[in-house]
Amino acid sequence: MIRHICKIIWNERKANGWILVEFIVVFCILWFCCDYLSYIVRSNSEPVGFDIDHTYQIQMSRKIQNEAPEGKKMDNYALMQTFVNRVKQYPGVESVAFSNAAAPYLGSLSRSSMLSLPDSIWVGARTRQVSSEFFEVFKIKPERGRIFNWEDKAETRNVIVSGNRNGCFDYFDEKGKTVELSKVKSFYYEDEKTEYPIIGVVNPTKEDPYSYYEPCIYSSLDHNEVNLESEIVIRVSPHADKDFAARFTKEMRGQLNLGPYFLTSVTSLQERKKEVLKNNGITGNLNSIYAITSFLVINIFLGLIGTFWYRVQSRRSEIGTRISMGASKKNVKRMLFGETLILLFIASFVAVNICLNIAQTDFLEAIGLPESRRDYIGAGIEQDFINYFVTYLFLAVVSLFAVWYPARQAVSVPPAEALREE
Amino acid sequence: MLRIYYKQAIEMLKQNKFISAIAVIGTALAIMMIMAIIVSDNIKTISLGAEPNRYRTYYVTRAVERDTVKRSWSAGGIGYDHYKNYLTDLQAPEYTTVTSWSSVSVSREGHSETLNLGVRTTGADYWKIYSFRFIEGKPWGVGEVQSGVKQVILSESTAREVFKGEKALGQEVLLNSVPYHVVAIVEDVSKIYDMANSDLWIPYSSIADYKQWGVGSIVYTLKNNEDLPALDREIREAEKRYDAQHENKVLTFRGPAKHADYRLSEQASDNEDAIEIIRVARRKSLFIFLILLLVPAINLSGLSLSRMRKRTEEIGVRKAFGAKRHVILIQVLFENLITSLLGGVIGLLLSYGVIYRMKHWLLGVPEDSFIPFNALISWPVLLSVVVVCILLNLLSAGIPAYRASRMNIVNSLTQNDKL
Amino acid sequence: MGIIQLEGISKIYRTKEVETVALENVNLEVKEREFLSVMGPSGCGKSTLLNLMGLLDVPAEGRVWINGTDTTGMKDGEMAEFRNETLGFVFQSFHLINSLNVLDNVELPLLYRKSSDKERREKAKAVLEKVGLSHRMRHFPSQLSGGQSQRVAIARAIIGNPKIILADEPTGNLDSRMGGEIMELLFKLNEEGTTIVMVTHDEHIAESTERIVRFFDGRRVE
């Protein structure tokens, strides 16, 4: 039967050419859509490493005053302690953390290169300055060793680290080379003489769901560096997390007028995350992909339904003949479906070759289309197979739906009528 | 002649409702997508309403300073020093001003309520470049900006929100706890005017430490777009002057960028990079337009060919009675144009629906912002919908029309010739 | 009972405005190995009769027995099987599938039953040999003359070894010499044991067959 259908497709090649070309173009585009969506789905299925449910950022500002009164140094550490005490007394607040360039989705980050010991390898990593409660707020789990506390004073310089996807540090200047976390005992920063011993390892983290696991070094926030304009994040117990931001702002505004500082806003990190995803283009990319996919699907649907409608009409007598030769309605429908699927198969074969070749080049980058980052999700060649099958299945389902109506039309004509002369 | 074609085309549309519907839907869909992009692009760049001078407005948004010894670099908004000593008093621009936007907490003395609103800092010429309807009061001039008076202009809805129906003009509001004097109320500005829109406006010099904080972006308007090379030259000269006065420093100002481009170029690391980013963005839109045109065109070509195949005999008869090739060509194209135009009108209407529903994604404004009617329907939009229709028509009916016109008479009469 | 048995057959075509009686209370028995001609002016219902015998259509009233089986109320699949195994069709306008070559056209009925590619190919070659067209196997229908086309159609009708061949004016589109060749072929098949029912206009051709039934205005008149 398949050979028979192939013959018909070949002999009708003029009419099939158009649908074939359309299938190829659409297949290619959907392939890359699928590639990108897989990257999104697979990234999303892996933990970010930060638990941001029920967490909030508290933003404080300094009053704009013409000139600060001279000679009166503020004790920022004392202000901070007052702040923590007051916030912690608010019902539902579980932990309060201060940090610099550390909390996710707040927009600031710092990276640096360090000399790792004992092997004297320059490694690159994200650096975060945090207070010890930072790990509680985001439920970052220790994997080995311990987490520092406020009593680990700045002079001890203890640091905590986390690795990349494979539990390694990346070389700073040689791409692709890595060193295992367990082989690093301590660090030197470029222009300092002090050693930073590693006292613990925590779970790996990413900037956002669609980023990669970046090695990270957490150092303790220096008491002298803390002020109320640092990042302040809090964790709230789940049952207290209802209208929390509004309630907290209203009830705490007065209490949090501390020195020159006042409360500006309380924002949940989930909301921050949404903004970040909007701004880094992921949301826009997804919208574009949904739009273009729907557009293509509707087009292929219209194209097939139209082409097969004409085909069934011009082949009315052929279908009548087949029925008189003993084909059942099922046979005829199956033949039309078979024609569609084989056409799609031929197209997919051509399209896959095109896609794999395009993927080798930087064509997508050159025209600014969203690209799947396979290195971020540790995907390999299996992704090509996934793309192929998903795209093929998806188009097959759409095509069968499109051909279904003309096919039903075809067999609904009584054979005696179909055979009558036009 | 065309009237007869028109009649026949309409008749054929009616006779074959199913296929006609498919062709019209296909066309409408393509035109909806294309017009949604064109219209939203038009809204982002058209010179209209509060921003009537977009076509001759240029922005310098960032300054990047490299230290050649430390090999470090820092990037940020335009500093006060940059503005005052290097980028103001240029020859080419008609007006020069600065503006930046941030959020501020707004309250009143003796009232507990605090609102988080957007505030825009401006220079004096800002009010000449952008166009506001002043309900009461008037904006500040050069003198006020120089003396750094704490004046504020409120939008109508902000005034209502803060003063709850009381007369706002002449009153005081606290911005981040600092008292400001209300000097004017302006009509609300749609969020599609991204440089004019705000809740409040204050002179940039009214902020206490503005000399350290910087002034945001610089806005120039030219009398004439031909002055752009001159503006560019002056800015580059300013960079050189800066480098000469600061040892081991290399300064780059990002710009001058057109209104349509300044947002894109903000992501760039230097001016060459900005050009490349804009080029990539152009290529991307071109590619998307190509897909949006090509896929429906292939689709409709297949359908038109099938339709022509059924009309082989008719075309044979027409030719037998003396129709020349180009006549057949024109007839087929014209018939198809009716479908395209029908689809075009439906598509344009649908595209307005799409823009209305997806403001955030397409225009980058909040879902609740209003879009002025005359930003939606303008001559460029109407012209482009006609151009897109004709383009789609040529792409989708070109080959079938050509084939039909080349058909052999005898074969088409005996229906042996297949298209 | 005959190999085809029609009992009280009526068929009415309805459109919005008119109701046309195509057949009215027709009884007919076709015996095994018989060569029967059905005659009558156009519109008398003879083609409808053939369609009913061929299970291409169902009667409004009455029963159609074929090869001892009552076909009333058969499902689509069963009817298809019946057409495929017991019946063979020859049409006035040949109804060859233009997009398939001669060999593929002849193979068609075997496509709808279980048979291997090789078996189909061999059988198709054999029947083409029989109708004298083995040298035209790779040609397409548009490259054949009318007589050749009809011989291909006959080859197609007999490839499945049907007990009955239903021929609807098989010589109607052919000149008399070609028509003669086709009739010879049909006579030969009849001699070999195939029952043939043929609708025709041509008195001369009809008289050469065993038995003639005549129809007028939906009724059997003879």
Image (tube, coloured by chain):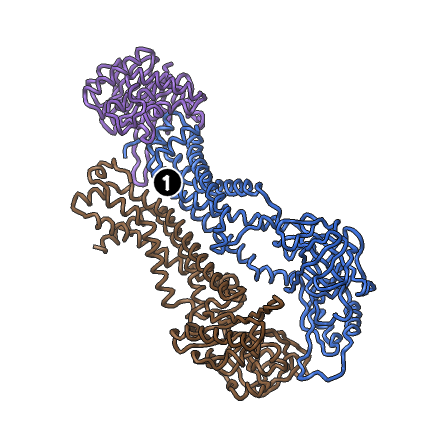
> Colour in which chain C is shown?
purple
- Relative vertical location of residue B171 with respect to residue C155 in this rendering, above or below: below
Mark 1 — on which chain does it sit? Answer: A
Q: Determine if residue B177 is in view.
A: yes
The residue located at (65%, 82%) in the rendering is B178
Which residue in the protein does label 1 denote?
A: A17
> Colour in which chain B is shown?
brown
Q: In this rendering, would A44 be left or right of B5?
A: right
**Quadrant position of the C terminus of chain B in the picture:** top left
- Relative vertical location of residue C92 with respect to residue A293 in this rendering, above or below: above
Q: In this rendering, would A340 be left or right of B269?
A: left
The quarter of the picture where residue C8 lies is top left
Residue type of the residue flagged with mark 1: Gly
Q: Determine if residue B52 is in view.
A: no
At mark 1, the secondary structure is helix
Q: How many marks?
A: 1
Q: Position of residue C169 (x, y in %)?
A: 26, 24
Q: Position of residue C173 (x, y in %)?
A: 22, 26
In the image, the chain rendered in blue is A
- Which of the two residues, B401 or C8, is positioned nearer the viewer here? B401
Q: Position of residue A42 (x, y in %)?
A: 61, 48
Q: In this rendering, would A44 be left or right of A315?
A: right
- Relative vertical location of residue A376 with respect to residue B213 in this rendering, above or below: above
- Relative vertical location of residue A190 with respect to residue B150 in this rendering, above or below: above
The residue positioned farthest toward the left in the image shown: B322
Q: Position of residue C6 (x, y in %)?
A: 35, 21
The quarter of the picture where residue C56 lies is top left
**Quadrant position of the N terminus of chain B in the picture:** bottom left
Q: Crowdedness of circle 1 by 10 Å Cα count: few (<14), some, many (20+)?
A: some
The residue positioned farthest toward the right in the image shown: A151
